[in-house]
Each structure stands twice: as structure tokens, then as C-alpha cells.
Image (cartoon, helix red, strand yellow):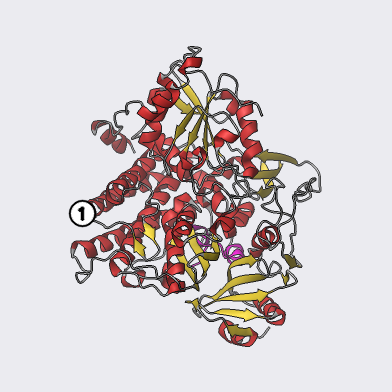
């Protein structure tokens, strides 16, 4: 194992350079700058991932963010086990009605200020499961969404570009719709 | 029950084959015939491969694997009631609970008649019945199995788990650290797949099948495509047949790499997670460059494949296979020489051959406990009849055995990738460059097929109308028969070993929740 580790050190990093903030994400976030409160997100963001009915494809790519190639933590991001420790809810899936309450409660358990990122076509309302009796249709129908990252599933590099836009922005969290 | 009765002779007795169902026969049985099949199953080891409902019918897929007999048996039930298989095949329990809830059928004598997928939140009951019902304003409270005795406590986990993982509820009943019972409560990610498939075009249905379980998207697509091709009598171009196998093996390799790393991580050996997930990423990147999708989603389509394999990509996969073989071997040596690692996997989460057989638990779960079944070999499908590979089988049935099945399967799949690559490099398709055969319009039919994913075989059954639309399609994830075995695997182990057991199984929540 020692030999293996030495070889890894000598071989240089396999981690790729981080992408620039995604243009679409910057635009989506900028659209709300009128309501700006200049809440700086600081230098780190903690995520809580919630699968609200995905096919698990999005989870595979979110997992990949943690691998040695994308190495999410160097940007100040990490995943927490509890919503109590999280700033950002990363939500996948068309929101299966069976998960609606669990999604809301997990979001509700996170302290303010908090942000929501809808990950994948299903979460954004354009996936293949929308329209079924068993699905709400999109994440924004249940909790306020700050950023949409499309793709089926979005690649880790696309996820990273969107998340970097979020941390670089100064946008206040989206407000919850009166319901 | 006489041991001399074979499944095929019983099938002859219980009904007539329905026309237009391929490639297995579908026998239309009456109640007496259906019941005699149940009675016969009690006295032998035939396999129940699936069970699914319709508004006024129920179907069961059965096999006598050693005799290579595979069939679907159907029962018309205008009274919406059918005798249950649950007493003779426990794997039928959750499938029958699902048929009851989605179609309003009644499984007579069902050993566990509690609800399964319906939590009362759909705004409709029996959504696929001829006449769906209004929602129940006061849905009954779900009763977990009763616990009797002293000194026990319960640990409820989920539906939202601590990691980046699908939702499900696990209720552990423990005595001190030791788990005395795990009960699963699933269905949280039920998306109504069967209802979306009904009336869909073949193209849209293929997209849904590709997303039944994203980690096994290729296998699902192959199973669905082959069922459609059987129903409509489509012959797939040889090049596409080999491309499918290529993608199927790459998917198997990627998932096994990820799961071995994750099992080690659950024993706090984070180095292995970093290494194995780094290797998995190499496969995903090659897939993106070669097939235009990291998971190869929607690349297998009814009639053939969407994409080809270029000479450059074939060479790259050949090199990747060699890299992976040597790097996996180094990591496996580390895994197998770390007592602190093996202490967590050896004798942990043991399941017996008897148990996996009773549920027909397939894939690495079955093969780690001595159940030698792989749908690439039996009943088999092309091009695996032209490829050389072994199906590794272990006997211990513990987490370690499931890790070793995965290790050996990676090695076998790498050999398969190399064999397939050489077929492409030698341009061995007699100049036939076709990737896809036309899906004929205006014909209907019924088809069934299986495809072996990394976790076991996916079964797809489809009925297509003359208008080319899907009338009914059932996709059966192998997890249906593995989840119940996971419940048993943790008995007598400590709570802290559950993540290792769970990851060594890696059942699909979405695939079984439909």
C-alpha cells in the first residue's frame, strides 16, 4: 500500500482544473439581484442531498463530484448528513408524491439562510416522469428553488460550474411562495 | 407432488399457448390450472421470475432453469381475484401487494396483505384499475410487524438517509448492539412508471425503461429493446448486438468498481473509495468520449443502438481494460491483506443458499451464496454465446463473498470488453455497418426478455397494440428479490455493519418502487 501511495504522489494530481461559473447559472441568479440583500455566502457551503424520486442517475453524478477528478471540497463545498448543518438543499427527482412531505420537512429542518438547487431534468420539471399520478412534477412546486441545473443526468462538470456560480454570487435565497 | 412432472408438461396440461407471444410461450390458464402451478411450485425448485397485474388479469413468469423451460402463465380474473403464490414463493409477496394496490386485484391467501407502495398521497387509489377509486380521506396507518419480548429498542432510519443515496425507511429492532430484525418500508420513490408506460410510443417507453434505475440504464434498455424486438419480430443488426454487450459490460465494470470502493469506505477505508471511484471515473469519461453519455443512457434503442464504436474508441477501451486490470489487481491485494478491513466483511451479513433460492435472488447476491444463475448464460442471449467468460460463484454468502463476486466479475467483464473490441478492430461484421433495424409500424405483439445488469437480471414484458403503442409493460428489477434477503442478512449483526451489508447488495430503490 505504501508503494501505491508513493506512486500516486510521484504521479502528480489527477484532479482537473475547476470550471468557470456556468453562464446559465449566473444569469438565473442575476435575475434576482434586484432583491439583493448582499448576503455573502462566505467561503464554504454545506450541501444536503435529497433524492425526491430520481432514477439514481443524478446521484451517481453527484457522487462523482466527490471523486479525485472533481474533488468538490477544494472549492469549499461538502456534503453533510443532517439538514441542520446544511446551507444548500440539492434536490433530484420529479418529487414523487410519496416523498413530498419528507422533502419539505428536510428543507424545513435546515437553518436560514438556505438555498435550493434543483438537479437534473426531472427536478426542473422536464423529465420523463412528469405527468404521472404519483409525481408532483418539479421541485419548485414544493420548496423555493434558487438554481436549476439541467441534464439527464447533468455531468459532474456541469454541476460544478453551477455550484461555483452559486458560491460566487451574492444573491439572497429565493422566497417561499405563499401556499 | 410427483417429482417426475416437468414444468413443460405441466404447462401443456394447464392451458393453451397464446398466439403472438415470443420467445417464451404464454399459457392462458384457468383458475384450476393456475392453482395446480402453485401446488407444483411447492414441491420443486422452479423459479418465479416475475408477477404483474392488469385490470382483469394476472401474469406470472416461471422457469425450470436446469431444463431450460421459461414461460409466462396468465389468469383472466374478471372477478379481480387470483390465488396467491406468496405461500410457496416469498418473492411474490411484494409483487402481489403491488398488483393489489395498482390494479385493485385481490391475491387470495397473500401471506402479508399490508399495503406496499400506496401511502395515501397519490390523490387516487388503484390508479391502473379499470375504474380508479377516490382517495381514502383517512388512509389506514401502516402497521410494522409486532415485536414481543423484553430489552429491545428500535432505530428508525429514513426515508431521507445520511448520505447521497435514494430514500427508503429501515426499522431496526435491536437488543443492545445486535439487530434482531430489520423491516424495510419502501415505495418512497414510486413514480407511476407502469401508468406512464401505458399508451406510450415505443420511443418514449424506451426512455422510461432507461430510467427505471439509472445505474442499470444499459441493462434495462437492452431488456426492454429485446422484449419489443421479440414482440414485433425485429432482427437486430449484428454490429448493434455486439455494441450492446460492450455497453452492458462497461456498465457492470463501472458499478462494481464504485460499489467495492463504497463497501471499503463504510469500513472507514477512505483510500479505497478514492482509488476505486477514480477508476470508475475513467470508465465514465471514456463513455462520454465514445458514446456521448457517461452512463450510456438512451444509447441502446429498440431495433439496435443509437451510436457506433469508432476504431479510436475501441483502441482506447482496449487500453483502458489493461489499465483497469493491473490497477484493480493492486487494490484487491490491499483489500485482501488488511485484517482491519476483512474483520468488517468476513462473516458479516451472511445469507444462505436456501434463502437466496427461495427468493430467486440473482446477481452477485445470489452468486455469493452459491446460486449459479446468470441470464447471459441461461437462457442466454446474443452475443454471449460467442464470447468466452466464466460466471464466478462463491459459497460463503457474506459481505466478503459479495465483494469477491464483484472483483471476479470485473476481471471477466474486462476480458469480454477485450474480445468485443477485437471484433470491432478486425472489422468482423462482413461489411454490415447497420446499427438499427426499422421498428415496423402497424403491427402488435407480446414479448419478454431478460438482460443481466451488474445487480442481476432485469425482466421486461411488453404488449404492443396494432397502433404501435404500449398497451402494458412491466419492468421487473432484480432488487424485488434482493431487498427481502437484505432484511435477513443483518439479523444477528451489529447496527454499524448495516451500511456494509447494504452497500454489498446495492439494491435499487427506484427500480423496485416503480
**Residue at screen point 55% across, 36% down:** A139
Q: Pick the residue in front: A165 or B199.
A: B199
Instruction: Give left or right: position of B60 versus B155.
Output: left
Residue that carries the numbered disc 1 in the rendered image? B315
B227, above or below B139, in the image: below
Magenta residues span B353-375
Instruction: Give left or right: position of B26 versus B115.
Output: left
Q: Chain of mark 1?
A: B
B319, above or below B226, in the image: above
Mark 1, residues whose alpha carbon is within 10 Å: few (<14), some, or many (≥20)? Answer: some
Magenta segment: does it hold B365? yes
Q: Percent x, y for residue B40? A: 66, 79
Q: Pick the residue in front: A35 or B377.
A: A35
- Which quadrant of the figure contains the N terminus of chain B? bottom right
**Residue at screen point 79% across, 50% down:** B146
Q: Pick the residue in front: B496 or B34.
A: B34
Instruction: Give left or right: position of B227 versus B26.
Output: left
Amino acid at each position: 500500500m505504501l508503494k501505491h501511495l508513493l506512486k500516486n504522489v510521484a504521479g502528480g494530481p489527477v484532479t482537473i482544473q475547476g470550471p468557470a461559473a456556468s453562464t446559465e447559472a449566473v444569469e438565473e441568479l442575476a435575475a434576482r439581484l434586484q432583491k439583493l440583500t448582499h448576503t455573502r455566502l462566505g467561503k464554504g457551503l454545506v450541501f444536503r442531498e435529497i433524492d425526491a424520486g430520481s432514477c439514481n442517475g443524478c446521484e451517481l453524478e453527484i457522487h462523482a463530484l466527490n471523486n479525485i477528478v472533481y474533488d468538490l471540497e477544494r472549492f469549499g463545498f461538502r456534503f453533510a448528513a443532517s439538514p441542520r448543518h446544511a446551507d444548500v438543499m440539492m434536490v433530484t427527482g420529479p418529487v414523487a408524491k410519496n416523498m413530498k412531505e419528507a422533502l419539505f420537512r428536510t428543507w424545513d429542518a435546515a437553518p436560514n439562510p438556505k438555498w435550493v438547487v434543483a438537479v437534473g431534468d426531472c427536478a426542473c420539471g422536464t423529465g420523463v416522469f412528469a405527468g404521472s399520478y404519483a409525481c408532483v412534477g418539479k421541485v419548485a412546486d414544493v420548496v423555493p428553488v434558487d438554481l436549476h441545473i439541467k441534464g439527464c443526468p447533468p455531468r459532474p462538470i456541469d454541476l460544478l460550474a453551477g455550484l461555483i456560480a452559486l458560491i460566487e454570487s451574492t444573491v439572497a435565497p429565493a422566497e417561499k411562495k405563499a401556499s | 407432488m410427483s417429482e417426475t412432472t416437468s414444468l413443460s408438461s405441466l404447462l401443456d396440461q394447464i392451458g393453451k399457448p397464446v398466439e403472438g407471444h415470443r420467445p417464451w410461450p404464454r399459457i392462458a390458464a384457468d383458475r384450476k390450472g393456475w392453482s395446480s402451478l402453485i401446488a407444483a411450485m411447492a414441491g420443486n425448485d422452479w423459479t418465479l421470475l416475475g408477477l404483474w397485474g392488469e385490470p382483469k388479469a394476472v401474469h406470472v413468469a416461471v422457469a425450470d432453469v436446469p431444463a431450460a423451460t421459461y414461460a409466462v402463465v396468465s389468469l383472466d380474473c374478471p372477478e379481480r381475484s387470483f390465488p396467491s403464490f406468496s405461500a410457496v414463493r416469498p418473492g411474490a409477496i411484494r409483487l402481489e401487494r403491488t398488483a393489489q394496490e395498482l390494479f385493485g386485484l385481490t391475491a387470495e391467501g397473500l401471506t402479508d396483505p399490508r399495503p406496499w407502495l400506496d401511502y395515501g398521497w397519490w390523490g387516487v387509489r388503484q390508479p391502473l384499475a379499470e375504474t380508479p377509486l377516490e382517495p381514502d380521506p383517512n388512509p389506514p396507518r401502516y402497521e410494522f410487524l409486532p415485536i414481543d419480548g423484553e430489552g429491545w429498542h428500535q432505530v428508525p432510519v429514513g426515508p431521507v438517509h445520511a448520505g447521497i443515496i435514494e430514500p427508503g425507511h429501515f426499522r431496526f429492532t435491536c437488543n443492545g448492539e445486535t439487530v434482531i430484525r430489520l423491516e424495510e418500508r419502501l415505495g418512497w420513490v414510486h413514480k407511476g412508471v407502469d401508468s406512464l408506460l401505458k399508451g406510450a410510443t415505443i420511443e418514449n417507453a424506451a426512455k422510461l425503461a432507461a430510467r427505471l434505475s439509472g445505474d442499470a440504464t444499459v441493462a434495462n434498455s437492452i431488456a426492454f429493446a429485446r422484449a419489443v424486438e421479440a414482440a414485433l419480430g425485429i432482427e437486430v443488426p449484428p454490429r448493434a448486438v455486439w455494441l450492446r454487450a460492450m455497453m452492458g459490460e462497461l456498465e457492470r465494470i463501472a458499478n462494481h468498481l464504485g460499489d467495492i470502493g463504497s463497501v471499503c469506505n463504510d469500513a472507514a477505508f477512505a483510500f479505497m473509495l478514492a482509488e476505486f471511484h477514480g477508476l470508475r471515473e475513467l470508465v465514465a469519461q471514456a463513455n462520454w468520449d465514445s458514446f456521448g453519455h457517461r452512463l450510456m443512457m438512451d444509447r441502446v434503442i429498440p431495433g439496435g443502438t443509437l451510436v457506433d464504436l469508432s476504431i479510436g474508441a475501441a483502441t482506447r477501451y482496449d487500453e483502458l481494460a489493461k489499465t483497469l486490470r493491473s490497477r484493480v489487481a493492486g487494490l484487491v491485494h490491499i483489500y485482501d491483506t488488511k485484517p482491519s478491513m476483512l474483520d468488517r466483511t468476513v462473516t458479516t451479513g451472511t445469507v444462505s443458499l436456501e434463502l437466496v433460492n427461495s427468493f430467486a435472488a440473482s446477481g452477485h447476491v445470489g452468486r455469493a451464496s452459491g446460486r449459479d444463475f446468470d441470464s447471459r448464460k441461461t437462457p442466454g442471449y446474443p452475443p454471449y454465446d460467442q464470447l468466452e467468460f466464466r460466471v464466478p460463484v462463491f459459497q460463503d454468502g457474506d459481505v466478503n463473498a459479495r465483494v469477491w463476486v464483484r472483483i471476479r466479475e470485473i476481471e471477466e467483464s474486462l476480458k469480454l470488453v477485450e474480445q468485443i473490441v477485437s471484433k470491432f478492430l478486425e472489422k468482423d461484421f462482413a461489411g454490415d455497418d447497420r446499427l438499427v433495424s426499422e421498428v415496423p409500424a402497424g403491427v402488435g405483439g407480446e414479448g419478454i426478455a431478460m438482460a443481466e445488469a451488474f445487480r442481476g437480471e432485469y425482466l421486461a414484458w411488453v404488449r404492443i397494440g396494432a397502433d404501435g403503442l404500449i398497451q402494458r409493460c412491466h419492468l421487473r428489477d432484480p432488487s424485488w428479490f434482493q431487498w427481502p434477503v437484505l432484511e435477513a442478512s443483518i439479523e444477528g449483526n451489529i447496527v454499524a455493519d448495516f451500511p456494509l451489508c447494504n452497500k454489498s447488495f446495492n439494491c435499487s430503490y427506484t427500480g423496485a418502487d416503480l
